[in-house]
Image (cartoon, rainbow, N blue to C red):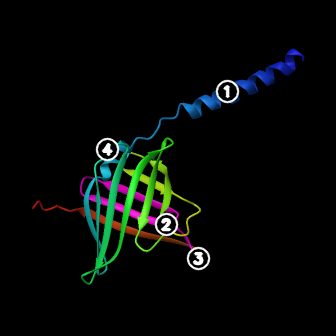
Amino acid sequence: MSPATRLPCCVALLLVGSAGLSVAAQPQLSITSVAWLRGCWQGTIGQSTMDEQWMAPRGGSMLGMSRTVRGGQTTSYELVLLKEQDGRLAYQAHPSGQASAVFLSREVSEATVVFENLQHDFPQRIGYRLSGVDALSAWIEGTDKGRPRRIDYSYRPMRMRTW
């Protein structure tokens, strides 16, 4: 091999090697990245009231639960295990009347988290955004029966009574 051909090969090897290092050097996400979700939140859409509660991060996980009430009746609920998984965050949803599904973190920042599962029917994305200390926005979005769809939820902190 001539020196002229060795140089491009060496450069290619260095690029491949450094790309592997940069992937390995990416920080692992910690459940504490979304500690801002913790607490009790409440919102309304029309005649429905939604309560959502998140436990503080501990043991690499957070537990969440939600309930929707309309006309004095619980119309739906969901249990969520949010945990660290392979350097990402996994949102394991267990909704009432539906099969469980796992969504992996796509975006995580100081006040926003978006989870995605493109193989899920609807939604394919679940997101949360904290605005200040007194507003939490949530949304589900994706394609439903071939059409784009998004549902937005607005929550405020809810004070829990102690017995």
The residue closer to the viewer here, 25 or 84, is 84
Q: Residue at x 31, y 59 (%)?
A: 136
Q: Is residue 136 magenta?
A: yes
The crowd level at tag 1 (other Cα within 10 Å; few <14, some 14-19, many 20+) is few
Q: Earlier in the sequence, mark 3 or mark 4?
A: 4
* Closer to viewer: mark 2 or mark 4: 4
Q: Earlier in the sequence, mark 2 or mark 4?
A: 4
- The label on residue 58 is 4
Secondary structure category for the residue under label 1: helix
Q: Is residue 85 magenta?
A: no
- The label on residue 17 is 1
Secondary structure category for the residue under label 2: strand
* Residues at discs 3 and 1 in contact (Cβ within 8 Å): no
The residues bearing labels 1 and 2 have C-alpha atoms spaced at a distance of 38 Å
Identified by mark 2, the residue type is Glu
The crowd level at tag 2 (other Cα within 10 Å; few <14, some 14-19, many 20+) is some
Secondary structure category for the residue under label 3: loop
Image position of 84 (left or right of 8): left
Q: Earlier in the sequence, mark 1 or mark 2?
A: 1
Q: Residue at x 58, y 31 (%)?
A: 22
Extent of the magenta region:
123-146
Image position of 35 (left or right of 8): left
What residue did someone put label 2 on? 141
Residue 103 x, y percent position in the rendering: 49, 57
User: Residue 120 falls in which quadrant of the image?
Assistant: bottom right
The residue closer to the viewer here, 9 or 159, is 159
Image position of 64 (left or right of 91): left
What residue did someone put label 3 on? 145
The residues bearing labels 3 and 2 have C-alpha atoms spaced at a distance of 12 Å
| Position above or below: 93 against 71 | above
